[in-house]
Amino acid sequence: MKKSSLIILLFIVLSCNNSKDKIIIIKNKKEIENKQLKEIQNPLENLDSITYIATKFINDYVSNCNKMKEQIGIIEWVNSYPNVSQKFKSELTKMIQDAEEKDPEYGLGFDPIFDAQDYPDDGFKLTQFDSTTNYLTVEAKSWKGFAITMRIKKMDNEYLLDGCGVINIPKNKQAKR
């Protein structure tokens, strides 16, 4: 079958007056097919990177919160964490500082990363991912119904956490409470 297709293709190419154009078209078609194949393969690699970054971040954050007396403050922890966008860090800092200025005793009153006052101490697992928007949802491993919306953004050829809980997540995309 391959030989007969190749022979027919060769016959068509040789019988045309503009054989160079035909060969270029065929060559470009092959290049396009190869590019499309790579694009099909890359989302799988990207999916692994994106979901890994998001789930690692939220589970590392849970581990920090579980440390009780040794835990690092939220702003300091996020600012020192790799794979977090500057926009996320700035928005978190602004949100907490604004709340503390308004009410120094109570502050924000909830954790903006969890979008809650309390959290499941056994961590989260991925439950949903939208590869067109890079929004994903993680759900508590054992606390049924406790979900958090997150967003990853590609910046300078690397994936960074750019939204989580209420930070840089539009109201209509936030997990329902």
Image (tube, rainbow, N blue to C red):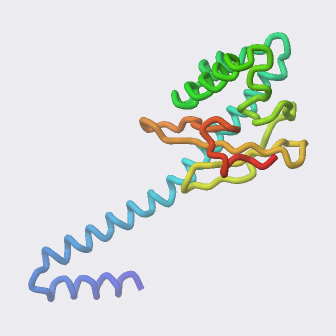
Which residue appears farthest toward the front when viewing the image? 102
Query: Where is residue 147, by image quadrant?
Result: top right
Viewer-proximal residue among 139 and 34: 139
Residue 167 lies, in percent from the top left, at 64, 35
Residue 13 lies, in percent from the top left, at 19, 83
Residue 58 lies, in percent from the top left, at 72, 33
Vertical comparison of 51 with 31: above or below: above
Q: Quadrant of the N terminus?
A: bottom left
Which residue appears farthest toward the top when viewing the image? 69
Residue 175 lies, in percent from the top left, at 74, 47
Q: Tell me if 35 is positioned left or right of 64 in this view.
A: left
Residue at 66 percent of width and 51 percent of height: 172
Viewer-proximal residue among 21 and 109: 109
Viewer-proximal residue among 63 and 102: 102
Query: Where is residue 107, by image quadrant?
Result: top right
Vertical comparison of 18 with 145: above or below: below
Residue at 26 percent of width and 68 percent of height: 27
Which residue appears farthest toward the left when viewing the image? 17
How many numbered discs, if any?
0
Residue at 48 percent of width and 36 percent of height: 158
Q: Tell me if 26 is positioned left or right of 165 in this view.
A: left
Residue at 15 percent of width and 75 percent of height: 21
